[in-house]
Image (cartoon, rainbow, N blue to C red):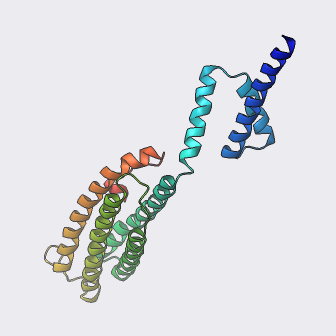
Amino acid sequence: MFEATSKRRYAKRATAVFTTTVASVLLGLGPCDAASLDHAVIGSTSGAAAEFSSTLDRSAKHMTPGFEQAMAVNAILLSMSGTRSELAPALDQIRSCGAPQAGMATLSMVAESRRNQLDTVRALQVDALPGGAILRSALDDALTMSLNADEAFVEWARHRSTGGCSASLTEDSAYQSGLSFSERATQAKQRFVDLWNPVAQLYGLSQRTADDI
């Protein structure tokens, strides 16, 4: 009887050690962390076991192709946010004629950034994301409309800077074209974020609004 009891205790201990080792590999724990985890496994309650399982699930999710692809999309969105932040000050410089040449230079850089972002989007791997192809297409549309708006505003800025700021805000065809493309870009961005936010939530990434990108 004593021998059977010892075997059961040994089996329980071996199972705990095995679980600890697997967790250490998956989570990248050091020796001290592994020892703490070993103690937690052996003396765990059902609640602690559930939390441990949840941690493993999250770690496994972050090792999937879907997570890596979602992170690639998120990186582009961060870049788009930075580009957008440069746009309004440049437009103000041109509208006010305070520094139209500087504003035009900034708009040209914004447009170039959009082109690079668009190229990156079109090369994205999205097969592991829910609705990945549709998601990529929606982001492509949003960036295309944004780029068209930027290019139209660059042309308007050229009119303003070379004509002594005489080009009208309301009648200049390039300016009106820029406004039209901007409106379409906002609509395309809204369609994209409606698709993106559930995916972002799935992988623990920030959700967005159309104004963020």
Residue 26, how many percent across, how many down?
A: 66, 45
Q: Residue at x 16, y 79 (%)?
A: 173
Q: Foreground: 39 or 150?
A: 39
Residue 162 picture quarter: bottom left
Residue 84 picture quarter: bottom left
Q: Residue at x 81, y 15 (%)?
A: 5
Residue 157 picture quarter: bottom left
Residue 114, how many percent across, how many down?
A: 38, 73
Image quadrant where one finds the N terminus: top right
Q: Is residue 61 left or right of residue 193?
A: right
Q: Residue at x 30, y 69 (%)?
A: 146
Image quadrant where one finds the C terminus: bottom left
Residue 100, how many percent across, how many down?
A: 33, 80
Is residue 134 something that shows in the picture?
yes
Q: Is residue 182 left or right of residue 143?
A: left
Q: Residue at x 58, y 27 (%)?
A: 50
Q: Foreground: 210 or 24?
A: 24
Q: Is residue 43 left or right of residue 154?
A: right
